[in-house]
Amino acid sequence: MNKNKYIELAKKAANIQINELKKIKAVFNKSFVQAVDLILNCKGKVVFAGVGKSGLIARKISATFSSIGIPSFFCHPSDALHGDLGQIEKKDILIIFSYSGNTTELTNMLKYANRYRIKIIGIASKPESLLLKASDIRILLPRVKEADITGMVPTSSTSISLLLGDCLATTAMYQRKFSRDKFKIFHP
C-alpha cells in the first residue's frame, strides 16, 4: 500500500466517527435527565461496569467522576462473580455500559442489583436487550456505523459511549457548581 494513502484512510475513519457522533443529541432526553438526577442524589458511590471495550469506557468515566468529587469505582462483572459484588451497597447506583446490552457476563450483576434494589442506569443500543430490560433508567444509544474497514470493530460505538459518559459528568459538574479550586483538591 502506498504510505501516502495512510492519511487519506485516517481522515476517512475520522470523518465517519465525527458524523456518527452527531447522533448523540438523540440521547439527551427524559432518561438522560433522570440519570443525572439519580447521580446527583446518590447517597453512596457511583459504580461503573462493562465488559471488553465498553468496560474500558466505563473505567474511564468512573475515573472522571472520581476526579470531580463524585465517589466512584469500576467493578468488572467477571470479578463481581468472585466476591466483588460485596463492594456494591443498596445506597450505591450502578451504571453499566454495553453497546449490545446482551453481554452474558452482566447477568449475575444485574440479578444481584435487582434483588437488592440497587438502582441501575443501563446504557446500550438495543432497546430489547437484557441490560435495558433490567435497568431502572434506560439510555438508548443510537446505532452507529463503525469506522473500520470491516464495519465491525468498536470505533464509533466506543466513541459515542465515551461522549455520553463525559456528558453525564459535565452536566453533573455544572449542577454541583464544580470549580477550578475544587478540581485542584482532587488533582494536587
Image (cartoon, rainbow, N blue to C red):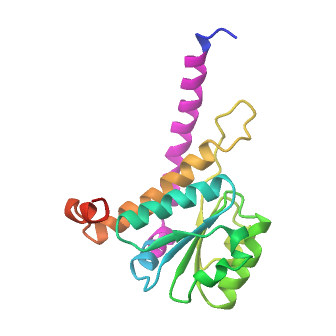
Q: Is residue 153 above or below residue 15?
A: below
- Lateral position of residue 44 relative to residue 48, left or right: left
Residue 185 is inside the magenta segment: no
Position in image of residue 175 (x %, y %): 30, 70
Position in image of residue 169 (x %, y %): 41, 63
> Which residue lies at the image location 63% right of the left edge and 84% below the top edge?
86
> Which residue lies at the image location 67% right of the left edge and 71% below the top edge?
132
- Lateral position of residue 55 relative to residue 30, left or right: right
- Look at the image and tell me whether residue 29 can be seen: yes
| Residue placed most toward the observer, 27 or 166 | 166
> Which residue lies at the image location 48% right of the left edge and 68% below the top edge?
32
Hey, which residue is sitting farthest left in the picture? Answer: 181
Q: Is residue 91 above or below residue 55?
A: below
Question: Where the N terminus falls, by quadrant?
Answer: top right
Residue 7 is inside the magenta segment: yes
| Residue placed most toward the observer, 24 or 102 | 102
Position in image of residue 46 (x %, y %): 49, 75
What range is drawn magenta here? Answer: 6-35
